[in-house]
Image (cartoon, rainbow, N blue to C red):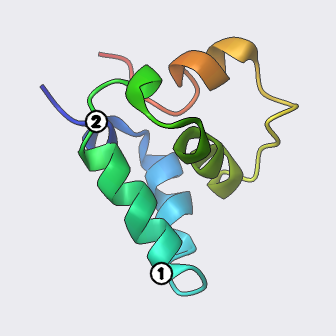
Amino acid sequence: MENLWQRLKPAVKKQILAEKDLYPNLVNEVKVRLENNNFWNDLPITTARQVINFTHDSVYDISMNDFMWGDKFIKKA
């Protein structure tokens, strides 16, 4: 089974990596957490929020399903 980093949509992964020069430690931390988890709902809430922030979406503007299950960020199987 692929981990969450592998299953991220290419556009989301690109947005996260685009911030690496400004926030190298944060990007690395998020990447490691995504690589160490297979399911969105296993992520700490802070990591899910960080992924959302990297996409420049507001936590208040996305649907509850996207926040809870990562539908907007993860490729469909």
The residue positioned farthest toward the bottom in the image shown: 21
In which quadrant of the rendered view does residue 5 lie? top left
Packing grade of label 2 (10 A; few <14, some 14-19, many >=20) is some
Residue 9 higher or lower than 17, as above or below: above
Residue 2's x, y, as percent?
17, 32
Residue 48's x, y, as percent?
56, 39
Task: Quickly name the residue at label 1.
Answer: 24
In this rendered view, identify the residue nearer to me: 68 or 1: 68
Residue 17 higher or lower than 45, as above or below: below
**At label 2, which amino acid type do we have?**
Asn
**Helix, strand or loop under label 1:** helix
**Helix, strand or loop under label 2:** loop
Task: Quickly name the residue at label 2.
Answer: 37
Name the residue at 65% across, 24% down: 67
**At label 1, which amino acid type do we have?**
Pro
Position of the N terminus by quadrant: top left
